[in-house]
């Protein structure tokens, strides 16, 4: 039970103590490993993360201390069936967010209907009046969206928030997978897991597809660049 008295969902173990099917292979592998070896591997992963600089800062934290991205050797397992369902929902959500921004910078029907108070728009410092009437290349406002999910039941996921302004964190996932594959290669030979290493290529392809029409199908090749405030930014590891 949590402090608020709400029961937390155990993703690996059923209420009767049995292992959920998605975790059966992993649990079998985990139980067969030497506990002291697992602890040493966990400590080694932390040293690696610290050596490489896989850290982040929390804005508003007075100490301003860099924090190490936590490494957990017990993965969050999502089945193919669950992922197909999540994919449809997330893609629909991103299309809705994009349509919302398109409306805000054009007809503002959501304001006219009274569903969004005009003050919420007028007083929001993130709203750029200069963008009114402008349609970005490809009609895409949200090139990258971080949808924060939490699992609340066997077949139930809830959205905590939509990060559409400055989403970050995918690099930590990529590094986590690389570390897991390096430390526990036999685990990935036993359990079929979809690769994630193609994410950077997919991202670059998606961004190039949003280039102005002059670049589409012509000899010009769009240049995709990463802008960073520098090494003192909380997400610099992601930028690098």
Image (cartoon, rainbow, N blue to C red):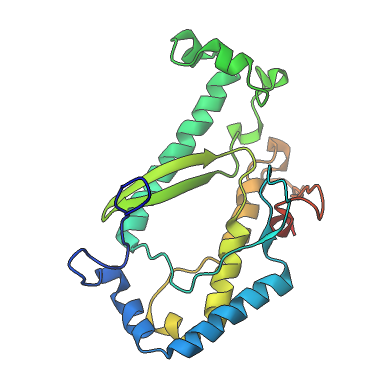
- Between residues 207 and 125, which one lies in front from this camera angle? 125
Residue 68 can be seen in this image: yes
Query: Which residue shows up at 31% across the image and 67% down it?
Result: 12
On the rendered structure, is 193 left or right of 10? right
Return the residue found at the far left: 16
Quadrant in the picture for the N terminus = bottom left
Q: Quadrant of residue 211?
A: top right
Query: Which residue shows up at 25% across the image and 68% down it?
Result: 20
- Using the image, determine if residue 72 lies above or below residue 5: below
Image location (x, y in percent) of residue 200 = 63, 60
- Using the image, determine if residue 174 lies above or below residue 129: below
Q: Quadrant of residue 127?
A: top right
Image location (x, y in percent) of residue 231 = 81, 55
Query: Which residue shows up at 62% across the image and 60% down it?
Result: 171
- Between residues 207 and 30, which one lies in front from this camera angle? 30
Residue 201 can be seen in this image: no
Query: Which residue shows up at 62% across the image and 14% down it?
Result: 122
Q: Quadrant of residue 144?
A: top right
- All told, the count of numbered labels is 0
- Using the image, determine if residue 111 lies above or below residue 78: above
Quadrant in the picture for the C terminus = bottom right
Image location (x, y in percent) of residue 213 = 68, 36
Image location (x, y in percent) of residue 21 = 25, 70
- Between residues 37 and 4, which one lies in front from this camera angle? 4
């Amino acid at each position: 039970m949590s402090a608020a008295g709400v029961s937390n969902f155990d993703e690996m173990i059923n209420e009767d103590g049995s292992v959920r099917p998605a975790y059966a292979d992993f649990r079998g592998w985990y139980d067969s490993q030497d506990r002291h070896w697992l602890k040493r591997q966990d400590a080694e992963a932390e040293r690696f993360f610290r050596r490489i600089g896989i850290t982040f800062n929390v804005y508003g934290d007075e100490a301003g201390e860099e924090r190490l991205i936590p490494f957990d050797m017990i993965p969050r397992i999502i089945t193919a069936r669950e992922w197909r369902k999540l994919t449809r929902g997330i893609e629909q959500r991103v299309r809705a967010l994009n349509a919302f921004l398109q409306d805000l910078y054009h007809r503002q029907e959501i304001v006219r209907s009274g569903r969004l108070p005009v003050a919420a728009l007028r007083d929001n410092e993130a709203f750029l009046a200069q963008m009114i009437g402008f349609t970005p290349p490809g009609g895409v406002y949200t090139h990258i969206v971080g949808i924060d999910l939490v699992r609340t039941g066997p077949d139930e996921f809830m959205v905590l928030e939509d990060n559409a302004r400055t989403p970050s964190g995918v690099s930590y996932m990529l590094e986590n997978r690389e570390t897991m594959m390096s430390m526990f290669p036999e685990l990935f030979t036993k359990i079929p897991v979809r690769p994630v290493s193609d994410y950077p290529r997919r991202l670059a392809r998606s961004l190039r597809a949003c280039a102005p029409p002059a670049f589409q199908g012509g000899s010009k090749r769009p240049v995709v660049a990463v802008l960073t405030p520098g090494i003192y930014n909380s997400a610099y590891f992601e930028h690098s």
